[in-house]
Amino acid sequence: MARRTTGSYAAGRARRERILDAATENFARQGYHRTSMARIAQDVGLTGPGLAHHFASKSHLLLAIAERRLDMTGHWAEEALAPDDGTGPLRGLLELTRRLAEQPGLIELFVLVSAESADPASPAHELYARRYATVVEQLGAAFERDVAAGLLRRDLDCAGLARECVAVSDGLQLQWVIAGGALDLVGCMRAYLERLAPGILASGAAVQLD
């Protein structure tokens, strides 16, 4: 019985991941509002009630995708923190922006869920509250490590700088959506980070992040 239960759980998890993959692909390609639950169900070989067993509504799907997207972006940022010249966190932010720009539909989803998270009664509120706390803490810690290594200015407000960087990133994504994708998201983020660098690097040197 235990083996059968474990197998059923694993199968359910796998089916849930396939649903999220299909929904992510459809949302990214067609947009959230133009994608129907019926289309997602069809793509994974389920009936409408079968899909509803896993996700009661499209908004539940959106929230699950947003959570997975936040986890994914956290991994991307960690991968890009390698340089030991004080620019690691900045390069990480730029690389994260590049990867987001490759999946424009997910930027739209992020902005949609961000708006919903302003409501304290929404499940998205807790998700985004955790997200901001974690991202600011991790990015601030990366700046602190470079301060301790003598790569960044000793008087740097690391937590404040982390919040500023996150605010710029999120604000640019919102502007990108409002502009219908016409904004050069990567170019704007690169320009901001390169303007920022001389003021925070211990050397005061200008940098090119490409």
Image (cartoon, rainbow, N blue to C red):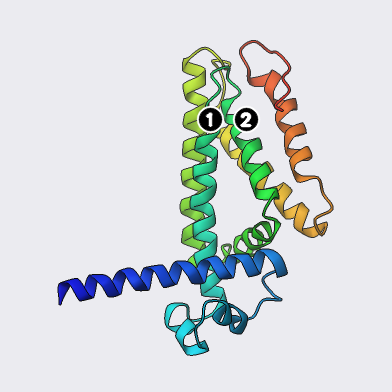
Nearer to me, 45 or 48: 45
| Occupied quadrant, residue 181 | bottom right
Q: Residue at x 69, y 75 (%)?
A: 33
| SS at circle 1 | loop
Q: Which mark is residue 103?
A: none
Amino acid, disc 1: Leu
Residue depicted at x 74% and y 41%: 186
**Horizontal side of residue 173 vs 181, given as left or right:** left
Check whether the beta carbons of the residues at disc 1 and disc 2 lie within 8 A of each other.
no
Give amino acid for label 2.
Answer: Leu
Depicted 78 relative to depicted 8: above or below: above
- Is residue 34 among what the camera can see? yes
Q: Is residue 54 left or right of residue 31?
A: left
Residue bearing mark 1:
81
- Residue in the picture at 75% in, 26% down: 195
Q: Which residue in the protein does label 2 denote?
A: 90
Quadrant in which the C terminus appears: top right
Q: If the image is split into quadrants, where does the N terminus sit?
A: bottom left
Q: Nearer the viewer, mark 1 or mark 2?
A: 1
Extreme residue toward the left, this view: 1
Query: Crowding near pointer 1: few (<14 within 10 Å), some, many (20+)?
Result: some
- Relative image position of residue 105 (x, y in whole percent): 68, 61
Residue 28 vs 173, above or below: the answer is: below
**Cα–Cα span, label 1 and label 2:** 8 Å
> Which comes sooner in the sequence, label 1 or label 2?
1
> Residue 109's x, y, as percent?
64, 63
* Count of labels in the image: 2
| Image position of 132 with respect to 54: above or below | above
